[in-house]
Image (cartoon, grey):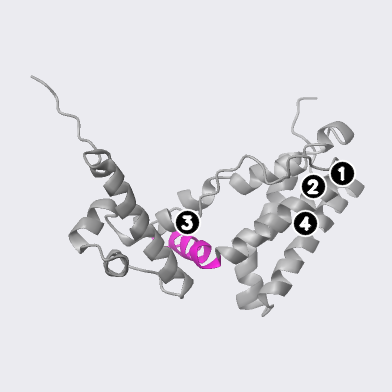
Amino acid sequence: MTTRVAVPYEQSGRRNQKARTREALVAAARELLATGITPTVEEAAASAAVSRTTAYRYFPNQRALVVAAHPEIDRASLLPDDPPEDPEERLALVVAETTRIVLDWEAQLRASLRLSLEPGEEPTGPVLRRGRVIGWLEDALAPLATTHPRLDRRGLAIAIRAATGIEAFVWMVDVAGLTREEAASTMQWTARALLRSALRDGGPEARSAT
């Protein structure tokens, strides 16, 4: 007896057309998010001129749709091709870029954060656990491996991420009442301050056997 393996809808037949339909739904979701609406599958379908039945074949629920609208930036590094050697300069470049991402994709990032906090979901659901920013920050701090070998660069990167991500941005804007520009400036200042403190005081030491 032959076992039939189920093929995901998007991977079966007319794949190019299905890819375009999916892109249209994601683009519609992003446009709605930019206006302050967290779209349902039906709303995205209407905006993209796609039938509701078809839309649900791609996204079975609102969470799946919003997750797909989350920005995907497939870059191993945010540094230029010929980056500086100074860790502070490198960090400034990376944090400036991650801050730009927060500003440009604020609506989508807020929606992902909101979904990650829904009852029944993991507190830091899969969208916000991909660790891309931590990797970019570790890349910025790479020269410290030579100059400060005992410094826990990953621990420092995590501390900087905690103070410069969408979560910190939302708190500064919504609770502290800063403008978006002031919040962005504060995040960049905080990143520099954390690095300087780690260089001065030692910061988190690398976990190693003694």
In the picture provided, is 164 more to the left or to the right than 149?
left
Mark 2 is on which residue type?
A: Arg
Q: Are marks 3 and 4 in contact (CB under 8 Å)?
A: no
**Distance from label 1 to label 4 (Cα)?**
15 Å
Image depth: mark 1 or mark 4 in front? 1
**Distance from label 2 to label 4 (Cα)?**
11 Å
Residue of label 4: 191
Magenta highlight on residue 107:
yes
Residue of label 2: 90
Q: Is residue 84 above or below residue 29?
A: above
Magenta stretch: give its range.
Answer: 106-119
Label of residue 70 in the image: 3
Q: Secondary structure at mark 1?
A: loop
Image depth: mark 3 or mark 4 in front? 3
**Distance from label 3 to label 2 (Cα)?**
26 Å
Local crowd size for mark 2, using a 10 Å CA cut-off: few (<14), some (14–19), many (≥20): many
Quadrant assignment, res 11: top left
**Distance from label 3 to label 1 (Cα)?**
32 Å
Local crowd size for mark 1, using a 10 Å CA cut-off: few (<14), some (14–19), many (≥20): few
Query: 98 or 11, which lies in front?
Result: 11
Mark 3 is on which residue type?
A: His
Comes first in the chain, label 2 or label 4: 2
Taken as a whole, is the magenta stretch helix, strand or loop? helix
Q: Are marks 2 and 1 in contact (CB under 8 Å)?
A: yes
**Distance from label 3 to label 4 (Cα)?**
24 Å
Residue of label 1: 86
Q: Secondary structure at mark 3?
A: loop
- The x, y position of residue 127, in whole percent, is 48, 51
Query: 16 or 188, which lies in front?
Result: 16
Local crowd size for mark 4, using a 10 Å CA cut-off: few (<14), some (14–19), many (≥20): many
